Image (cartoon, rainbow, N blue to C red):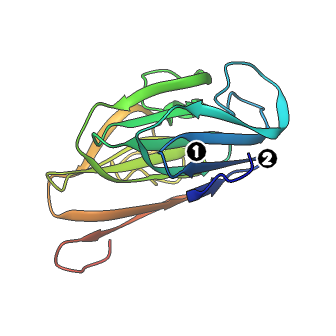
Amino acid sequence: LEGLKVKDVATNTESSYFLDLTGALWSVGQDTSGDLGSGVDSHTSVPVKVVEGNVTEVAARNQTVLYRDQNGSLHGFGSGGHGRLANNSTSSRHSPIMVHDANVTSFASGADHSAMVLTDGSLWTFGQNHRGQLGNGTKAHVSQPFRVEASGVVDVSTYPENTIYVKDDGSLW
């Protein structure tokens, strides 16, 4: 991969991911739940191209990887535990799947949950919720996106047991 130029990186428990200047997504490391996106459980010390191009941003945590393409669509692969890939399933995905089909402006991958902001400013969460990190008023896991805020959200961040977001008035929630 001599001469490869990188524009974004992410890492999780045992693997690393990077985008090259063409928007191709690459992975390298240990595949424990499909989180290399290569289609098979394995490990590699040589980067593997997962997506040919058009990727603009990548995020990873534990064994889940999310990425956004130029159309604003959100995709993912790896562990689907607790529904964190929003595919109405808890199964792992060894190849990329569609999480949301368009209009994603911000997204984050927590330890066992994920979140996304859409162009209308709405905030959606999905995945594990044992500490109430999804903001839906329960502790039930959600395998389909749940709308937390209807509008005004500009950015989101997640960590193992929390979700924080910024609204367009600068307030932090």
Instruction: Specify the quadrant that holds the C terminus.
Output: bottom left
Q: Is residue 20 above or below residue 51?
A: below
Find residue 88 and report its image quarter.
top left
Tell me where residue 55 appears, x and y as whole percent. 44, 43
For mark 1, does the 10 Å Cα neighbourhood hold few (<14), some (14 to 19), or many (20 or more) residues?
many
For numbered disc 2, what is the local secondary structure? Answer: loop
Tell me where residue 82 appears, x and y as whole percent. 55, 33
Q: Is residue 118 left or right of residue 163?
A: left
Tell me where residue 160 appears, x and y as whole percent. 59, 57
Can you tell which of label 1 and label 2 is closer to the viewer? 2
Q: Which residue is tagged 2?
A: 14
- Residue at image point 33% right, 48% down: 136
- Residue at image point 32% right, 64% down: 155
* Residue farthest toward the bottom in the current orientation of the protein: 170
Which of the numbered marks, if any, corresponds to residue 43? none
Which of the numbered marks, if any, corresponds to residue 112? 1
For numbered disc 1, what is the local secondary structure? Answer: loop
